[in-house]
Image (cartoon, rainbow, N blue to C red):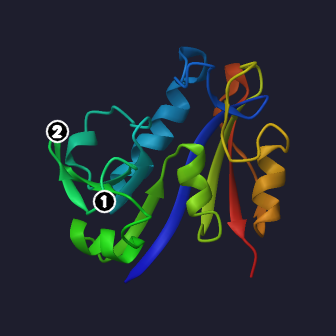
Amino acid sequence: MSFRFEGYVIVSADGMLADADRVMPGSLKFEGDKLFFEQALDRAALIVHGRHSHEGQPNSPKRKRLILTRKVKPLTVDPEMPNATLWNPEHASFAEACAFADVASGTVAIIGGPVVFDLFMDRYDTFWLSEAPRVRLAGGEGCFVGVPERTPHEVLAAHGMKPGAPFVLDAAHGVTVTPWRRVG
């Protein structure tokens, strides 16, 4: 297997990816970020996320994906999405899940939530951190395990990643995306 691991998240100024109800609010949705995200996922061989995360884009049903869940033990095809494999990491390895999903190489796009991001934290080649500095989600769900006690930047740096130059995705709202890359 030959994979490149990339993470994708957009966060509020306080490091949240969802509101207190664990839902991504409209205030965190921006056309520039949506386009960047959609184009990245169109290039990915495999999408990995938890059961509360889904990109809901026109090409979503065509994408191969692993959905992390504790509700299954053996790997199984999601009865509602034929390109999705339900995966419980406590009962099957990532390699086994990829073999089941018939994906042996390419980019693996990790799109959340916090526990899913954490599972791959030491594997990312690049983590694309989009930030909406004018949005605050008090009481929301932190993007990573350990947020808000630490910032998303501190979590990524603690896992050996360094930020590159940010790109502007939405100038009117100050939304940027920064590639955090593994050092060495």
Q: Is residue 34 above or below residue 129?
A: above
Image side of residue 137 versus residue 17, left or right: right
Rendered-image quadrant of the N terminus:
bottom left
Q: Where residue 167 sits: x, y (%)? A: 68, 44
x and y, in percent, of residue 5 in the image: 51, 67
Q: Nearer the viewer, mark 1 or mark 2?
A: 1
Give the Cα separation between the discs numbered 1 and 2.
18 Å
- Taking the spot 73% from the left edge, 26% from the top edge, the residue there is 174
Mark 1 falls on what kind of element? loop
Asked if the residue at tag 2 contacts the one at tag 1, i.e. Cβ–Cβ closer than 8 Å, the answer is no
Vertical position of residue 173 compared to residue 69: above or below:
above
Mark 2, Cα crowd under 10 Å, few <14 / some 14-19 / many 20+, is few
Q: Is residue 64 visible?
A: yes
Q: Secondary structure at mark 2?
A: loop
Q: Nearer the viewer, residue 126 or 64?
A: 64
Q: Is residue 120 left or right of residue 162?
A: left
Q: Residue at x 55, y 18 (%)?
A: 25
Res 119 label: none
Q: Amino acid at mark 2?
A: Glu
Which circle's residue, 1 or 2, is located before the other in the chain? Answer: 1
The residue identified by callout 1 is: 73
Q: Quadrant of the C terminus?
A: bottom right
Amino acid bearing label 1: Lys
- The answer to whether one can see residue 164 in this image is no
Residue 82 in the image: x percent, y percent? 14, 49
User: Residue tagged by mark 2?
Assistant: 80
